[in-house]
Amino acid sequence: MLINCVVYQDGNKLSDIPIDEISDYLVRPDCFVWVALKDAEPAELAQMQEEFNLHELAVEDARNGHQRPKIEEYGDSLFTVVKTAEMVDGELHIGEIDIFTGKNYVLSVRNRSNQGFLGVRARCEQEPEQLRKGSAFVLYALMDAVVDRYFPVVESLEAELETIEGKIFDKGLARLNIERLYDLKRQVVMLKHVVAPLMEAVGKLSGGRVPALCESTRDYFRDVGDHLYRINALTDAIRDTVATAIQVNLSMVTIEESEVNKRLAAWAAIFAVATAFFGLWGMNFKFMPELDWKYGYPASVLLVVCVCGYLYYRFKKSGWL
């Protein structure tokens, strides 16, 4: 689905144009075309391939989707895959934006994401001196917007972790906490798989041999890389804390089970005394207390009660009951 198709000249918006007029503006000096698509159909991608002369392998990757974050060079053009991340009803949702960048064009294809980028376009149009740098600055602006949206996701994961940590020592919640921690760990790993490859890819645009297309925006991509390093460090910290919290909760489960076992052992010891007394007397009928002595039976019962009561007192005082 086409979101917009705009042509810019000398850093200023010239006009919105229909797709079939793109080729007319690509030949003009100091012009570049910025097209945005959402969940593009194969026919739309084929049309864009024809208009911009896109490499067939890059188009195939965009058509198939589910690519690893990366930046690939095809001649004098770049193909960039960036993963979007957003929290939807407490669940991490991963989308994708594929960006084709050439000297005089930018084509962004957004897939499985409700995050719009109209704000990015407005920001670029408000900075014509930056937009004069051409399509490379648009690539930076799109990547910067995606990366900045990772921070609220990290904050949400940290808030969830703090909530769970506050309930770690609440009795009866250990198993539930472990389930929540494993779910949180799964989401952290998902975010890690989004950030780490992109961090490596962005390094190609700020250090070493930088593509000629991005030479004028090298410092901007270095800033994006710095943000990614921060997010990666925060993600690692959350993952380590989650691992520690899981171990603590497993220890709490063991402690709770130990408490139950101690209670069962204490009650078993108490009833074992009664069983021992009655079992011993029940095997000798001639000298059974209630047959040879008038008060033998109540005395034996009183003895058993006293011993069991004493054991109960001792177990209670030691914390077993």
Image (tube, helix red, strand yellow):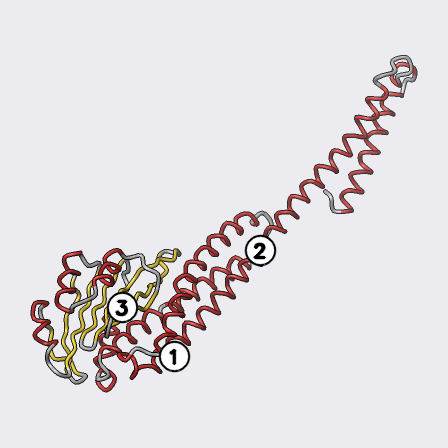
Residue type, numbered disc 2 = Ile
> Residue 79's mark?
3
> Residue 208's mark?
1
Q: Is residue 152 left or right of residue 49?
A: right
Q: Secondary structure at mark 2?
A: loop
Q: Is residue 151 left or right of residue 72?
A: right
Q: Nearer the viewer, mark 2 or mark 1?
A: 1
Q: Secondary structure at mark 1?
A: loop
Q: Nearer the viewer, mark 2 or mark 3?
A: 3
Q: Secondary structure at mark 3?
A: strand
Horizontal and vertical percent position of residue 108: 23, 67
Depicted 269 relative to depicted 100: above or below: above
Question: Mark 2 sits on what residue?
Answer: 168
Q: Disc 2 to disc 1, how far (Cα)? A: 47 Å
The tag earlier along the polypeptide, 2 or 1, is 2
Residue type, numbered disc 1 = Gly
Residue type, numbered disc 3 = Phe
- The residue at the point 12 percent across, 80 percent down is 14
Few, some or many C-alpha atoms within 10 Å of disc 1 (few <14, some 14-19, many ≥20)?
A: few
Q: Disc 3 to disc 1, how far (Cα)? A: 19 Å
The tag earlier along the polypeptide, 2 or 3, is 3
